[in-house]
Amino acid sequence: MKKLISFVLALVLLILPARAMEEFDENEWAAVATLKAVEDIPLSVPSAILMEKETGEIIYELNSHERLAPASVTKVMTMLLVVEAIESGKLTLEDMVTATAGATSKGGSQIFLKEGEQMTVDTLLKCVAVASANDAAVALAEHIAGSEEAFVAMMNKRAAELGLTDTVFSNCTGLPTEGEHLTTAYDIAVMSRELIRHDMIKNYTKIWLDSIRGGEFGLSNTNKLVRFYQGATGLKTGYTKEAGFCVAATAERDGVEFIAVVMHGESSDARFESAKILLNHAFANYTLVSALPDEALPPVAVELGETGFVQPVAAQSPKLLLTKTEAAGITKSVELAASVKAPVMQGQELGRLVKTAADGTELSSVPLAADCAVGKLGWWQIFVELLRLITMS
């Protein structure tokens, strides 16, 4: 019966009625995409945020620091810890995980693990990312930390490291709990940004339909945007009666990726439509511009240095999130010292790269620093150099 239910669910998602396609029709939101002012964005949810991945800049927020129950969006942090364990070498995708009685006892979305059943980390991570399987999440948590409680302590520690002061977890699934289990749209955006920095997670979060157990159990992504929104890369949905309908939605186009978090929607449609409105606004109006110089920087002369020149480099290589109007009129200017006295320290500032908008407003100032240290000539070296110059003259 469980296999039959899984098959029917996957079939239904494959043959969604025409109206479902219309709900996610790009043309339906054409007017939204042209909105220029964030205050004009029409949302029907109590809390939301729109963030750009590369810079972490917030474009829009609505009660983004209100503490709310996140439901299964909790699993953003669960997946982050799993991915970090894999990339640190603590886990491999081929490791076998044995389901415990604790993992199999979880309700809600699940893959119906049996006690003692074994699956790879790869399969279980896919089940968490695609089907939001609670039993798979707990199985991974127990495998990594020994118990779900110990894993939750890791989740809270990682949240603190990310500066998420409004977040507290009491489980790794987002299921209703007696303990405090709250976060905010802002905090979810930050942990989502951290997760999608690991490209491997998108191998799972972009899956629409898949299966496990040799094709006997179907998986269908709870995030409809993965199928219906251009450039969608994930990330996680959630629903409980207390939390309502939530989503952390990510999408990438033309090298720019945005994160839209929607909390406590009244319906599944409301959360997806709100996420689409935010993402459409971002893609229509914003772009990333490199803060690096367009041309190679000239070397700077070093007075009385062991070498005659030092090469300036950008002390950082950030990108700027600008409106497309700002980006079209941007100019770059390099301000460099004509020379610098030795000794020169590596990283010593030699000038700056300034980006200016068409109206003359300074948008950014990136320090230009010495790429290496240059020592000062000693008196004997100076004397030898003077003799060399006299001889040459």
Image (tube, rainbow, N blue to C red):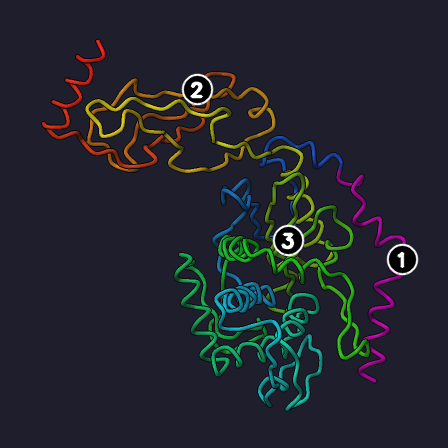
Residue type highlighted by circle 2: Ser
Alpha carbon distance from label 2 to label 1: 55 Å
Along the polypeptide, which appears first: circle 3 or circle 1?
1
Q: Which residue is mark 3?
A: 249
Q: Which residue is mark 1?
A: 17
Which of label 3 and label 2 is nearer to you? 2
Which of label 3 and label 1 is nearer to you? 3
Along the polypeptide, which appears first: circle 2 or circle 1?
1
- Span colored in magenta: 1-29
Which residue is found at the position 52% from the left and 32% from the top? 290
Residue 279, picture quadrant: top right
Q: Where the N terminus falls, by quadrant?
A: bottom right
Which residue is found at the position 76% from the left and 67% from the top? 220
Q: Position of residue 91 (x, y in %)?
A: 53, 73
Which residue is found at the position 54% from the left and 40% from the top? 59
Callout 3 secondary element: strand
Q: Which residue is mark 2?
A: 333
